[in-house]
């Protein structure tokens, strides 16, 4: 059996030195006695709470408070993907704490599947947003006439179909094994299957999109240098931050996955620790996106403030008169705000 990538279970089965004297019916977790394990649990708990709340906030604002546009369609889809992934993190955390898998074969397959759907879906959407920005800069008239919410929804649907298709191996080859009281969730590939899947993820889910995005950015930067009539660089900065966050977060994971393909060449403990940390860093990308929206997105921040002030005004009654004057200005800004988050 070829263990894959330590997602949701960070150990090889050959790490366990079982003896005949060991209790077959009981496994004792050692997580709380290990600094690394405790640190990863704390980090994943923070990611869970921040990611769940942050992405829920983005879904509420982009999906219900803002006018539906092409850009809100992109970012709403990203937030939904990150929200679903963060909602599954408690399973990962519980498995880490107990140092065994208790959630059955279905959840073993599903948790890994959701992680890679999130990975592929996120990067495909970032490629789409970059291409959309590039087309809008290069062909503004065509973009004005042909960019529509319906077309954006279709493109998003295609991206998710591709992400799901590329994530299917993560579910098919995921297995559960119990040995001497220790139950693990791992990937069991046919000969050379692990290498094929890992390289596909690296090139299709990392290198290829990076090349396309860099190409789009090069065109955008060259065009903006010759065009001083651009309204604002804020959307470009938000997009740049999202792309950098994705590649920085996922780079360690892909590096150690490639090292793991030839794990006999490297120190085993280094690869194991690297995959543990790399997976947690990759997971952190799911809560960074809403943080970037709040700090860098004018429309997103303005809509959030306006919505909160309306609720406060309703609660405070007569004390809301001063606030209402502010809201009248905020509402006028909202009606003519650009579509960029």
Image: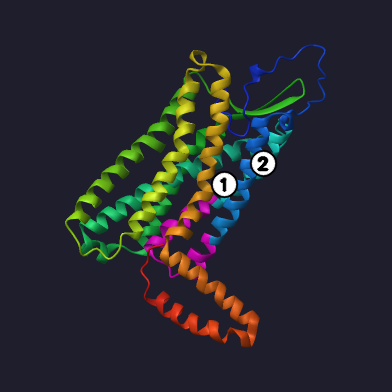
Q: Is residue 330 visible?
A: yes
Q: Which residue is mark 1?
A: 85
Number of residues whose C-alpha sits closer than 10 Å to that of mark 1, classed few (under 14), some (14–19) or many (20 or more): many
Chain part drawn in magenta:
58-82
Q: Residue at x 44, y 45 (%)?
A: 245
Q: Residue at x 55, y 42 (%)?
A: 114
**Front position in the image: 14 or 321:** 321
Quadrant position of residue 308: bottom right
Instruction: Judge from the rendering whether residue 244 lies leftward or rightward of residue 83; answer left or right.
Output: left
- Tell whether position 59 is magenta: yes
Quarter of the figure with the N terminus: top right
Q: Distance of mark 2 from mark 1, alpha carbons?
A: 11 Å
Count of numbered tags: 2
Instruction: Judge from the rendering whether residue 33 lies leftward or rightward of residue 68; answer left or right.
Output: right
Q: Position of residue 252 (x, y in %)?
A: 47, 32
- Tell whether position 229 is magenta: no
Number of residues whose C-alpha sits closer than 10 Å to that of mark 2, classed few (under 14), some (14–19) or many (20 or more): some
Q: Which residue is mark 2?
A: 91
Q: Is residue 193 visible?
A: no
What is the secondary structure assignment of the residue under circle 1?
Answer: helix
Along the polypeptide, which appears first: circle 2 or circle 1? 1
Q: Position of residue 62 (x, y in %)?
A: 48, 64
Q: Position of residue 143 (x, y in %)?
A: 26, 62
**Depicted 187 relative to depicted 113: above or below:** above
What is the secondary structure assignment of the residue under circle 2?
Answer: helix
Which residue ends up furthest to the top in the rendered image? 20
């Amino acid at each position: 059996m070829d263990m894959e990538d330590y997602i949701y279970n960070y150990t090889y089965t050959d790490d366990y030195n079982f003896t005949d004297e060991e209790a077959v019916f009981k496994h004792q977790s050692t997580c709380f006695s290990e600094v690394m394990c405790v640190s990863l649990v704390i980090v994943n708990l923070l990611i869970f709470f921040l990611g769940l709340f942050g992405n829920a906030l983005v879904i509420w604002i982009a999906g219900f408070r803002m006018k539906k546009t092409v850009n809100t369609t992109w970012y709403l889809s990203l937030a939904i993907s990150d929200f679903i992934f963060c909602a599954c993190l408690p399973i990962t955390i519980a498995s880490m704490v107990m140092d065994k898998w208790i959630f059955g074969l279905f959840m073993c397959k599903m948790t890994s599947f959701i992680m890679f759907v999130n990975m592929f879906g996120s990067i495909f959407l970032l490629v789409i947003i970059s291409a959309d920005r590039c087309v809008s800069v290069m062909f503004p008239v065509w973009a004005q006439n042909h960019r529509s919410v319906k077309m954006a929804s279709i493109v998003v649907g295609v991206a998710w179909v591709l992400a799901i298709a590329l994530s299917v191996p993560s579910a098919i080859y995921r297995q559960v094994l119990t040995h001497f009281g220790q139950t693990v969730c791992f990937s069991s590939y046919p000969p050379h299957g692990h290498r094929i899947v890992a390289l596909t993820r690296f090139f299709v889910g990392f290198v290829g999109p990076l090349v396309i995005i860099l190409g789009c950015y090069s065109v955008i930067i060259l065009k903006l240098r010759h065009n001083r009539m651009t309204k604002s660089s804020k959307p470009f900065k938000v997009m740049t931050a999202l792309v950098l966050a994705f590649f920085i977060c996922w780079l360690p994971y892909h590096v150690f996955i490639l090292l793991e393909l030839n794990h006999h060449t490297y120190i085993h403990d280094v690869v194991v620790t690297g995959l543990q940390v790399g997976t947690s860093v990759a997971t952190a990308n799911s809560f960074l996106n809403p943080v970037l929206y709040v700090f860098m997105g004018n429309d997103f921040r303005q809509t959030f403030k306006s919505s909160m002030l309306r609720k406060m005004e309703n609660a405070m009654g007569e004390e809301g008169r001063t606030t209402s004057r502010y809201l009248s200005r905020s509402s006028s800004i909202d009606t003519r705000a650009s579509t960029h988050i």
